[in-house]
Amino acid sequence: MPSRFRFKFRGDYSDLGPDGRFLQVARCVRPVLNIMTALVDDDREPQRGYLLLGPPGTGKTLLACILLNELMLRRARPGRFVNLSRKFFQQLRDTYSQDSEQYGKTFQILEHMCNIPYLVLDDFGVQRGTEWETEMLYDLVDARYGDENFTIVTSNQSRAELEQVAGGRVLSRLVEMCYVVDMQGQDYRQFLIS
């Protein structure tokens, strides 16, 4: 998990921008935080995850990390944050290189990701879309779907763009296994440069 989100919890979410104005995206996030409170405080394991869609800077990664941190802390079960735009596919590629410490460990890495109780897939849809990447991503989502493992997915892509991944098979599973939250609003980071 990125260090800036590592210790973020419910109390760290703010409805206000740096200038003190109410953030438009907060209308989308507040209901999710309320559902999250019930989810985290409930003794039962969560059945559905979240698919957080929206433009950059609307708090998708922050919200995903808050959910993950709360669940890991309250349930004392492991979770994992995976940024699809950087390390995940490179880590898998390294398993095919004889010079890598990860050589031959493709199955172990995927098996861990498929079975970990709580998983965040950040920046879904930014992968290059090679046949191999699409297959790896589909296998991961399909395994988590089949085992009903709690998954949070963030994406800057529209539903129409996500529909193109694996011929719609990935999005079809995600919308069944996740609550879809459209996080529309102004880019929080833009407040910082104005």
Image (cartoon, rainbow, N blue to C red):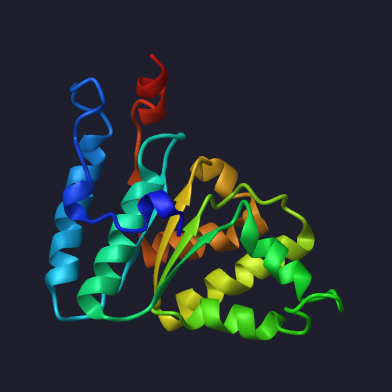
Residue 105 position within the rendered picture, expressed as x and y whole percent measured from the top left? 71, 83
Vertical arrangement, residue 20 with respect to residue 85, above or below: above
Q: Residue at x 70, y 80 (%)?
A: 106
Q: Residue at x 72, y 50 (%)?
A: 128
Quarter location, residue 42: bottom left
Residue lying furthest top: 194
Vertical arrangement, residue 130 with respect to residue 95, above or below: above
Residue 57 position within the rendered picture, expressed as x and y whole percent measured from the top left? 41, 34
Residue 94 position within the rendered picture, expressed as x and y whole percent measured from the top left? 77, 70
Between 48 and 56, the residue placed more toward the observer is 56
Q: Quadrant of the N terminus?
A: bottom left
Counting every numbered tag in the picture gives 0
Q: Residue at x 63, y 85 (%)?
A: 108
Residue lying furthest right: 98
Q: Is residue 116 left or right of residue 128?
A: left
Quarter location, residue 43: bottom left
Between 181 and 25, the residue placed more toward the observer is 25
Q: Quadrant of the C terminus?
A: top left
Q: Residue at x 77, y 61 (%)?
A: 131
Residue 22 position within the rendered picture, expressed as x and y whole percent measured from the top left? 18, 26
Q: Is residue 136 left or right of residue 30?
A: right
Vertical arrangement, residue 166 with respect to residue 39, above or below: above
Vertical arrangement, residue 159 with respect to residue 39, above or below: above
Quarter location, residue 70: bottom left
